[in-house]
Amino acid sequence: MTQTDAGWVKIVGLGPGNETMVTAQVQEVLAEATDVVGYIPYVKRIPERPGLTLHATDNRIEIERATHALEMAASGKRVAVVSSGDPGVFAMASAVFEALEAGKPEWLNLNIQVLPGITAMLAASARIGAPMGHDFAAINLSDNLKPWSLIEKRLRLAGEAGFAMGFYNPRSKSRPHQFGRALEILREACGGETLISFARDVSKPGETITTVTLDEATPEMADMRTVVIVGNADTRRVGRHVYTPRFAKEG
Ligand code: SAH
């Protein structure tokens, strides 16, 4: 095997935060890697050891980070690209493939694999009960990479179609007003009695889960450490749990 053949890129999900929720497969990759690449808070989760170089970079430079990972793998390094949750959900896996598409043709022969992790929406759903027990949609509420008008359209149509929904990146300091608008659209599309849960720091110290109706929900209930779960018209409480039945009436 040549030095180049020995290199690889494995794009791994670290789960929502708790170390027991990192899969054994991902732990193996982290033990074999020579280099770890990712956004600063995620790379901080990787313990240092001899033979491992950590490359922590700021957010919003995903393509440079992905290109760097591919370059290192082409020179024989074993590179783990880390994301929180699942790497295929609003995270690094797509960025690596974008960089591959724009990169050197010989990179197409590299050993590139995506290893799944537990995404925030499903970790939160499990804590809440079973709000995603029927059909659902996952929507990123950040308009960094798409126009806000498209987000409004998807929210409205998913609500009208009766999907339960999981919202990532719901409300940041740089766009404080959009989540209030999202709540307005949801009230119109789903009805004010629909249940909405705010799951903050899921699986981490200080985790909080709050369930209210859309009429009771206020924008301040969400921030960037929160994943928001909206049920459909059938989603209901049973004791301390919230669930969506597996059946649905004609739409
Ligand atoms: N790839 C990640 C999502 C990255 S987008 C995944 O699959 O989970 C970042 C957003 O994910 C945050 O703004 C928040 O909405 C959500 N998130 C990630 N970890 C979370 C956690 N532990 N608790 C609540 N929300 C979380």
Image (cartoon, rainbow, N blue to C red):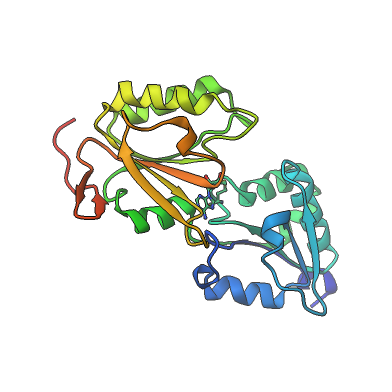
Give how far across and how far down residue 234 sits, in percent: 19, 40
Q: Is residue 37 above or below residue 121?
A: below
Residue placed at 26% from the left, 47% from the top? 134
Say which quarter of the image contains residue 169: top right
Q: Is residue 150 above or below residue 125?
A: above
Residue placed at 37% from the left, 33% from the top? 217
Task: Give 73 or 23, whichever is nearer the viewer.
Answer: 23
Q: How many marks?
A: 0
Q: Is residue 87 above or below residue 198?
A: below
Can residue 39 be seen in this snapshot? no
Residue placed at 25% from the left, 54% from the top? 241
Q: Which residue lies furthest to the left in this view?
A: 249
Can residue 118 be seen in this snapshot? yes
Q: In this view, does 28 lie to the left or right of 198?
A: right
Residue placed at 41% from the left, 54% from the top? 124
Q: Is residue 103 left or right of residue 157?
A: right
Task: Give 241 or 250, whichever is nearer the viewer.
Answer: 241
Locate the C terminus and report the quarter of the image it occupies: top left
Give how far across and how far down residue 188 sits, in percent: 31, 20
Give how far across and how far down residue 186 sits, in percent: 36, 27
Say which quarter of the image contains residue 60: top right
Locate the N terminus and report the quarter of the image it occupies: bottom right
Q: In this view, does 231 lie above or below 184?
A: below
Say which quarter of the image contains residue 77: bottom right
